[in-house]
Image (tube, rainbow, N blue to C red):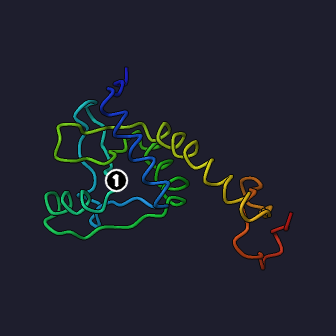
Amino acid sequence: MLHAPRIPELAQRDRFVRRAVAEGRVLTLADEENASVPSQKVAGRTVQLFWSSPLEAERWAEALAGNSELQDISLEVFATDILPGIAKAKGFAGTDWVSDPIEAEIDPRDLLIRLQIEAVPPYAAAARAKAEVYYVGGDDSPLVTPGTQKPRSADRLHV
C-alpha cells in the first residue's frame, strides 16, 4: 500500500502548488542525475525534486550537486511532460524540500490535479479581463485559452 501524506506534507504540497501557479514555473537541479533521490517511504521508488522557491532550490543544489545551477521549467512542460513521465515510471515528486524534516513525496497524478485546480481561477480571470478566448485545435483535444494576441495559425479559431 502506498504511503498517505501527513498534514505537514500536504501543507508543503499546497504551498508549492500556489507558488508554482503564481510564478508559472518550477525549478529543479540542472544536473538531473542529482535531482532524483531514493524514496524514504517506499522501497525501490525515486523522488524527483522540484522547488517553487529559488532560494531553497539553490540551497539544495549546493548540497546535492555542489553548485547552484538550476533548471527553470515552465508550468506547461511540468504538467504535460514531466509529471506524466514520473507517474509512468512510478516515482514521486518531491515538492519544496527545505531544511525542515518534512520531505514531501507526492504522487505526481495528485500533484497534477492540484495544479489544475489552482490554475482555474487565474485562467478564468484572464479570460474575463481579455473578454475573448481562442479555440485551439490539438492532437489530443481542443483547448480554449484566453487570448493574449491573435493567433496566426490556421488551427486556431477566435471566439
**Residue count near mark 1 (Cα–Cα under 10 Å), binned few <14, some 14–19, many ≥20:** many
**Is 153 located above or below residue 83 in the figure?**
below
Q: Is residue 66 left or right of residue 7?
A: left
In percent of width and height, residue 72 lies at: 39, 67
Q: Is residue 36 left or right of residue 83?
A: left
Residue sitting at 55 percent across and 59 percent down? 76
Q: Secondary structure at mark 1?
A: strand
Q: Amino acid at mark 1?
A: Phe
Between residues 22 and 97, which one lies in front from this camera angle? 22
Q: Is residue 128 left or right of residue 38?
A: right
Tally of marks: 1
Which quadrant does the C terminus fall into?
Answer: bottom right
Residue sitting at 54 percent across and 45 percent down? 118
In percent of width and height, residue 52 lies at: 36, 55
In percent of width and height, residue 124 lies at: 68, 52
Residue placed farthest to the top in the image?
Answer: 1
**Is 87 located above or below residue 77 in the figure?**
above
Between residues 29 and 43, which one lies in front from this camera angle? 29
Q: Which residue is mark 1?
A: 50
Between residues 24 and 45, which one lies in front from this camera angle? 24
